[in-house]
Structure formats: C-alpha cells, structure tokens
Image (cartoon, rainbow, N blue to C red):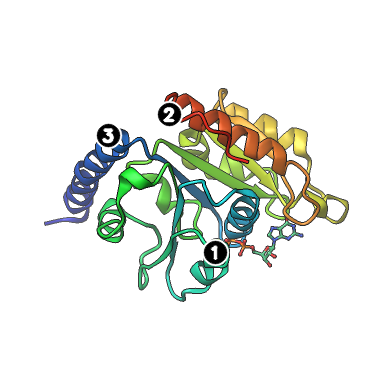
C-alpha cells in the first residue's frame, strides 16, 4: 500500500472514533475543547490559571498530551481536578483513539467541561478530530504575527485564537493588529482574545468566553463558572 491510501485509512478510522466521541460528549452534556499551539506557547499555563480560578463544584477535567514526560499533568493536578497525561511516545499529535482509551474510567456524565491539551505542534494536530466541540489555537507574541498565514489550517479550523504572553510585547516586535488581520484573512469569523498568564491581562475575557461557550452548548447547565 502506498503512503496516500494508508494516510487516508488512518484518518477515516480516526474520524469514525471521533464521531463516536462527539456523540458521547453530546449525550452526557460534556463540552470538550481541544487546545492547540506550537510547543511552549502557554497551553498548560493557561490551564493552570483557568483551574486556579474555578470553584471545586465545577465538574472540569483535563487530558494533556505530550511526546514524553508527565510534567504537564503534574502541574495541573495541583488544582484538585481530574487530570491525566497522555504520552504519545513520539507521535506529534493526539488522535481520537488515545482520547477514547484515556476516558475509559471517567464517567462523562460527571464532567461538564473537558479540556484536551494537544501535543505542542501547529501542524499535525489540525488534521485529527478528537470529537471536540471546538478547537482553540494559541499563538504567543514571541512567534511572529505571520504564523497564521504560514500554518493556515489550524487557524481556519479554530473557533478562538488566544494571542498569549502579551506581557512580553515591550521586548518583541510583534504587531497585534497585524496578527489579528492575518488570522481573519484565513478565518474571517475567528474570535480573538489577547492574554498574559504573567500579568493576568485578558484572563477574565477568556473566562467569559468559556462561560458563554458553555452556555451555548449546555443551556440546561447554566451555573456560572467562577
Ligand atoms: N512571559 C510569559 N511567559 C509565559 C506566559 N505563559 C507561559 N509562559 C512561559 O512559557 C513557557 C511555556 O509555557 P507552557 O505553559 O509550559 O507552554 P505549553 O504550550 O504548555 O508547552 P508544551 O506543552 O511543551 O507545548 C513557560 O516557561 C511559561 O512560564 C505568559 O503569559 N507570559
Ligand atoms: Mg503544556
């Protein structure tokens, strides 16, 4: 078998499992969000700030993916919510089968919000549906405002762009307006929030987005997140 049919077969198997996961998330009222970015853009830091601000009555869980180490799960477990590390052992993205396997001993009916932190990579994760309700892409100000144009697929497929590490703007020649314009050239409807986990800038706006997204997909469960 040559490379193209094999890749097609893997992707269609992934789509089948992702469709099953999406149906299970829908059935149990679990909002699943898939966080994607280049390595080090601040996915785990954002989740730390998010979990820190949530009350423990919130039914939130995290699956965090990396090629090696349990570091991110260790960072996130401190906040007392269910967290599992998925180590891919070399694969540069999470796939639906990995999500399915790691959900096996979690009761989805007890989880209202499931964050998936994908492996740090701006390319491969965009091809793998995980059954999520929405993809969220992070771009830090140290990466350059042209990345939206160079890696359009993930920006096209994401509902929200978080421009992160804005506290570093005085030290990097990053033009926020140009980054936003580039993102909208690829995806005119993309929503954009600028954040800094260090200064706290924009974190309330992110939490408000999260609350609204939760209300949109779970009108019956409208309890405030924070
Ligand atoms: N200055 C600044 N540094 C940040 C901010 N957010 C994260 N960092 C730093 O950026 C580095 C990477 O952050 P992580 O949260 O681990 O990034 P990540 O996207 O989870 O990384 P991977 O999981 O390895 O892809 C760490 O040293 C963080 O302290 C921020 O808002 N401002
Ligand atoms: Mg991380």
Q: Residue at x 71, y 39 (%)?
A: 204
Mark 3 vs 1, N-terminal side:
3
Residue 129 can be seen, yes or no: no
Q: Secondary structure at mark 3?
A: helix
Mark 2 vs 3, N-terminal side:
3
Which residue is disc 1 drawn over? Answer: 76
In whole angstroms, how far apart are the C-alphas of marks 2 and 3?
11 Å
Q: Are marks 3 and 1 in contact (CB under 8 Å)?
A: no
Q: Residues within 10 Å of mark 1 (few under 14, many from 20)?
A: many
| Residue 7 placement, left or right of 220 | left
Residue 225, given in percent of the width and then of the height, sits at 58, 39
Residue 165 can be seen, yes or no: yes
| Residue 141 placement, left or right of 45 | right
Which residue is disc 2 drawn over? Answer: 218
Which residue is disc 3 drawn over? Answer: 27
In front of the other: 203 or 150: 203
In front of the other: 5 or 196: 196
Q: Residues within 10 Å of mark 3 (few under 14, many from 20)?
A: few
In whole angstroms, how far apart are the C-alphas of marks 3 and 1?
27 Å
Task: In the rendered view, tell whether residue 39 sits above or below residue 130.
Answer: below
Assign the C terminus to one quadrant of the image. top right
In whole angstroms, how far apart are the C-alphas of marks 1 and 2?
25 Å
Quadrant in which ligand 1 is drawn: bottom right
Residue 116, given in percent of the width and then of the height, sits at 44, 52
């Amino acid at each position: 078998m040559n490379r193209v049919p094999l890749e097609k077969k893997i992707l269609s198997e992934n789509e089948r499992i992702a469709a099953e996961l999406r149906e299970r998330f829908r059935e149990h009222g679990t909002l699943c969000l898939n966080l994607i970015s280049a390595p080090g853009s601040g996915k785990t830091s954002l989740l730390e700030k998010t979990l820190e601000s949530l009350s423990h009555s919130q039914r939130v869980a995290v699956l965090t993916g990396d090629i090696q180490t349990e570091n991110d799960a260790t960072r996130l477990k401190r906040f007392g919510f269910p967290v599992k590390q998925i180590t891919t052992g070399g694969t540069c993205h999470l796939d639906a089968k990995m999500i399915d396997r790691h959900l096996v001993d979690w009761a989805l009916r007890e989880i209202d919000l499931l964050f998936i932190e994908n492996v740090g990579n701006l390319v491969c994760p965009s091809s793998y549906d995980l059954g999520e309700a929405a993809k969220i892409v992070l771009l830090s100000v140290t990466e350059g405002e042209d990345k939206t144009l160079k890696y359009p697929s993930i920006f096209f497929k994401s509902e929200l762009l978080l421009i992160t590490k804005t506290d570093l703007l005085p030290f990097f020649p990053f033009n926020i307006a140009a980054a936003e314009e580039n993102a909208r050239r690829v995806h005119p409807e993309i929503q954009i929030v600028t954040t800094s986990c260090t200064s706290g800038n924009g974190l309330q706006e992110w939490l408000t987005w999260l609350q609204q997204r939760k209300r949109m997909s779970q009108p019956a469960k409208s309890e405030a997140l924070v």
